[in-house]
Image (spheres, rainbow, N blue to C red):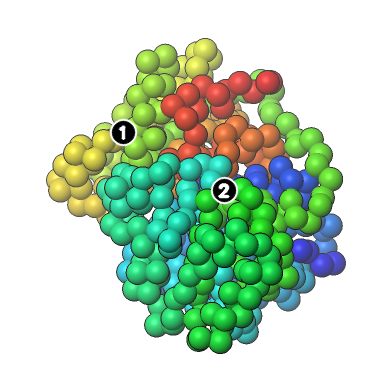
Amino acid sequence: MAVTTGVIADDFTGATDIASFMAEQGWRVALLPGMPDLTQQWNEEVDAIVISLKSRSLPAEQAVAQSLACARWLKQNAGVRQVYFKYCSTFDSTPRGNIGPVSDALMEAIQVPLIVHCPALPQNGRTVVHGHLFVNGVLLNESGMEKHPLNPMTDANLSRLLSAQTPNAVGNIDLNTIRNGVQAVTHALASLKAEGKRHVIVDTLDEADLHTLAQALHDSPLLAGGSGLGGALAANAGAQQTSPPQDFPHPVKAVVFSGSCSAMSNRQVNRYKTAATSRLLDVARCLSDAERYTDELSQWAMSHISDPHAPLIYATQPPDALKRIQQEYGEQPASQAIEHTFARLSAKLQAAGVNTFIVAGGETSGTVVEALQVTRLSVGKTIAPGVPWVFSAELALALKSGNFGDEDFFFTAQEYKS
């Protein structure tokens, strides 16, 4: 039973991001958290399968191995026509990877001469012009992403960023070519292929550019980038739009977690704290007294579960505070202790009856989904561009990339019946 597109996303919020854009255009999307059962044959009628990995921050060799296993399964067991490697619209990576190594491995496995990269997501202010990535009109390396705790983005030149991660040649298709239409894009790709370019970064300024690219690339067996092109591919297929499921548990018992330290997450947390009860995670106790501390947090959250606004537990910090924590406890030990606390807390709260989790941050979202042992999700209504509600059995989840949504996101997410 053939599936049009199989997506391999390098984190959980990236998976829900592209799944929401595809579902909004009428595609039937199956969202699979974590590695699929590689022995299982796919037998459902869907337009896209989206696999959410936590490979963005793994060592490159592990990210490659997981991505290749998913690609083989998608091609052999699900019969997908097109594989889409989904990464963040801010190109989150380091000189060690993982965008370059994973893309190279997928090209070899699928036996294609080149791969087109389209990270742009104009709907959320991510655009590419002259091969440079902008966030709301500001160069990537001046947007706040240069202070990212795991993947600091200190350059906006995508060719330079990608060239540091791959031995293969990188080319670019500029905005003028995109604006000249599908035939111009097709001709430019042929020319770059003849020149030996194996990675091609495409300029994209608005949604019209995405639709031009979708028309030019709809038959490509391998693509890479953000969710914008994924949504445009679904729109180009002409599926009939349907109402998304709204399977909220009743009664809703919700908590809010924020593990992201992005600029927007800081603003969202500060805004939400003005109206909701909240607790900042104590890193020292996460490291030294985890079990007892998690019990305390769980009891505290349940004591506020009927408040007008869901209780917030957060590790979100401004850059100067984050730097002090990393210097005092170590970057990796502090990060791992916080994520382990969120994992234990998720399981305890679920056992206590919490059925709705609103989570900010890709790493934290992945941690929560794994702790809740979710194996399949359906895509519901969009809360903000790239952030849908997703549902599994008796659970409702909102998994938000750090910089997505506006300052009122945590409030908006709780307008369950609107």
Where is residue 285 shown, x and y percent of the image?
25, 37
Q: Along the line of sight, which residue is nearer the eye, 311 or 271?
A: 271
Circle 2 or circle 1, nearest the eye: 2
Residue 97 is tagged as: none
Q: Along the line of sight, which residue is nearer the eye, 197 or 13?
A: 197
Label 2, secondary structure: give it: loop
Using the image, determine if residue 260 lies above or below residue 48.
above
Q: Is residue 83 left or right of residue 142?
A: right
Q: Along the line of sight, which residue is nearer the eye, 89 or 357?
A: 89
Which amino acid type is shown beneath numbered disc 1?
Leu
Q: Residue visible at 49% across and 34% down?
A: 405
Q: Which residue is mark 2?
A: 206
Q: Which residue is mark 1?
A: 281
Q: Residue visible at 66% across and 58% down?
A: 212
Using the image, determine if residue 25 lies above or below residue 312.
below
Number of marks in the rendered image:
2
Q: Quadrant of residue 353?
A: top right
Position of the N terminus, as image quadrant, is: bottom right
Q: Is residue 263 left or right of residue 418?
A: left
Where is residue 93 shown, x and y percent of the image?
38, 62
Q: Residue visible at 44% across and 76% down?
A: 170
Q: Earlier in the sequence, mark 2 or mark 1?
A: 2
Q: Residue visible at 42% across and 17% down?
A: 276
Disc 2 to disc 1, C-alpha distance: 39 Å
Q: Quadrant of residue 342?
A: top left
Using the image, determine if residue 129 lies above or below residue 245.
below
Where is residue 147 shown, x and y percent of the image?
27, 48
Q: Along the line of sight, which residue is nearer the eye, 175 or 154?
A: 175
Position of the C terminus, as image quadrant, is: top right
